[in-house]
């Protein structure tokens, strides 16, 4: 499959999607979103892929948001269709059965921050900038920003960013808990690949179970969340990965996880 608005490659079970419209700071137009969707479908269908990394071409931008040229042409009905389509693609990142890491190398604004927040966690270059500037366009976020940002940093801090549209540094994003680590620009991808490689050695069944327990559990009350965890634990325990992991521990050797998600 060919891609021109993203680059999509897989090495040793780690896929990397690189947003690749540098002249528009990797803004999300329909073509790019369509290619992102295809790449995500490929990942979902490929049992060998164990971790996904998302980043942007160059050092200037991760993604500078939805493509404003396209947004400007929409009316009420087409806006709903357009935004729903993009949102469903971005939600696929959150729903992936494997970990997704955002390697934010520059501007992560609007839809760019929303993509990063749909990932499981974010590492950022010290030169990265974050924000939900839609208010400056007379708009609001449409790819989850009003929902995911307050869940990550709290209501007051999220409202301050959403209502002011101000941009914050990587350091500030780290302080707020948006970003797990800040790294020098030339160290970013190396460190992201290190943690990706570490996760790629784990059992796929348990990786998926952790993602689902955290993601679904956060949207329900604590007793229901704990029930989700109990059920997921039981599923993991019955998996070949758990048999391998516990046997390897008792036999004092390294586990080799081969558990499959696709029958
Ligand atoms: N859509 C389309 N084109 C964009 C873009 C976007 N979101 N962001 C940048 N570009 C284009 C610029 O128009 C410019 O193109 P030309 O060279 O053809 O003029 C090129 O990328 C380089 O950008 P700048 O010259 O503006 O670069 P800069 O360094 O001076 O500024 C910036 C960088 C601060 C990121 C600025 O480009 C900017 O503010 N971009 C818009 C950011 C934004 O508002 N994002 C939210 C979009 S709405 C959204 O995302 C809604 C949603 O939730 C779904």
Image: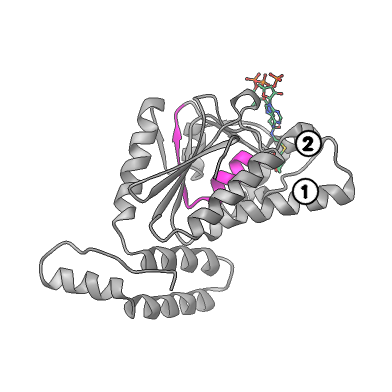
Percent x, y for residue 188?
Answer: 39, 33
Q: Do the residues labelled 1 and 2 touch (CB within 8 Å)?
A: yes
Task: Indicate left or right for 58 with 165 as reference.
Answer: left
Q: In this view, does 126 lie above or below 259?
A: above
Instruction: Compare residues 84 and 38 and report the one nearer the observer.
Output: 38
Percent x, y for residue 15?
Answer: 43, 46
Task: Indicate left or right for 99 with 134 as reference.
Answer: left
At 41% from the left and 52% from the top, the residue drawn is 51
Q: In which quarter of the image is residue 237?
A: bottom left
Distance, label 1 to label 2, CA atoms, is 10 Å
Quadrant where the N terminus is found in the figure: top right
Q: Is residue 256 above or below residue 226?
A: above
Quadrant where the C terminus is found in the figure: bottom left
Q: Residues within 10 Å of mark 1 (few under 14, many from 20)?
A: some
Q: Mark 2 points at which residue?
A: 70
Q: Is mark 2 within 8 Å of ligand 1?
A: yes
Specify the quarter for ligand 1. Answer: top right
How many callouts does the rendering have? 2
Percent x, y for residue 248?
Answer: 16, 69
Q: In this view, does 185 lie above or below 84?
A: above
Going from the N terminus, do you reach mark 1 or mark 2 first?
2
What scheme was used to colour the molecule?
Answer: one colour
Task: Indicate left or right for 243 with 227 as reference.
Answer: left
Percent x, y for residue 235?
Answer: 39, 78
At 85% from the left and 41% from the top, the residue drawn is 74
Q: Does the residue labelled 1 lie within 8 Å of ligand 1?
A: no
At 41% from the left and 26% from the top, the residue drawn is 185
The region drawn magenta spans: 111-126
Report the disc number at residue 82: 1
Q: In which quarter of the image is residue 88?
A: bottom right
Secondary structure, mark 1, is: helix
At 49% from the left and 60% from the top, the residue drawn is 45
């Amino acid at each position: 499959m060919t891609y021109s608005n993203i680059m999509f490659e897989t090495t040793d079970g780690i896929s990397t999607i690189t947003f690749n419209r540098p002249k528009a700071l990797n803004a999300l137009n329909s073509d790019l979103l369509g290619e992102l969707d295809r790449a995500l479908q490929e990942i979902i269908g490929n049992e060998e892929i164990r971790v996904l990394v998302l980043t942007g071409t160059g050092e200037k931008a991760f993604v500078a948001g939805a493509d404003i040229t396209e947004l400007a042409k929409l009316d009420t009905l087409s806006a709903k269709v357009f935004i729903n389509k993009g949102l469903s693609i971005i939600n696929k990142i959150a729903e992936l059965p494997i970990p997704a890491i955002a390697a934010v190398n520059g501007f992560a604004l609007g839809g760019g921050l929303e993509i990063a927040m749909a990932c499981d966690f974010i590492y950022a270059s010290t030169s990265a900038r974050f924000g939900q500037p839609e208010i400056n366009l007379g708009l609001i976020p449409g790819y989850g920003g009003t929902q995911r940002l307050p869940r990550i940093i709290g209501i007051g801090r999220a409202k301050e960013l959403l209502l002011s549209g101000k941009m914050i540094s990587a350091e500030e994003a780290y302080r707020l808990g948006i970003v797990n680590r800040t790294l020098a620009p030339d160290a970013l991808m190396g460190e992201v690949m290190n943690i990706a490689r570490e996760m790629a050695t784990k059992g796929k069944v348990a990786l998926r179970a952790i993602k689902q327990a955290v993601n679904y559990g956060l949207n329900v009350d604590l007793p229901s969340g704990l029930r989700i965890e109990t059920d997921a634990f039981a599923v993991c325990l019955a998996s070949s990965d758990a048999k391998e992991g516990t046997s390897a521990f008792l036999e004092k050797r390294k586990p080799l996880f081969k558990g499959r998600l696709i029958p």
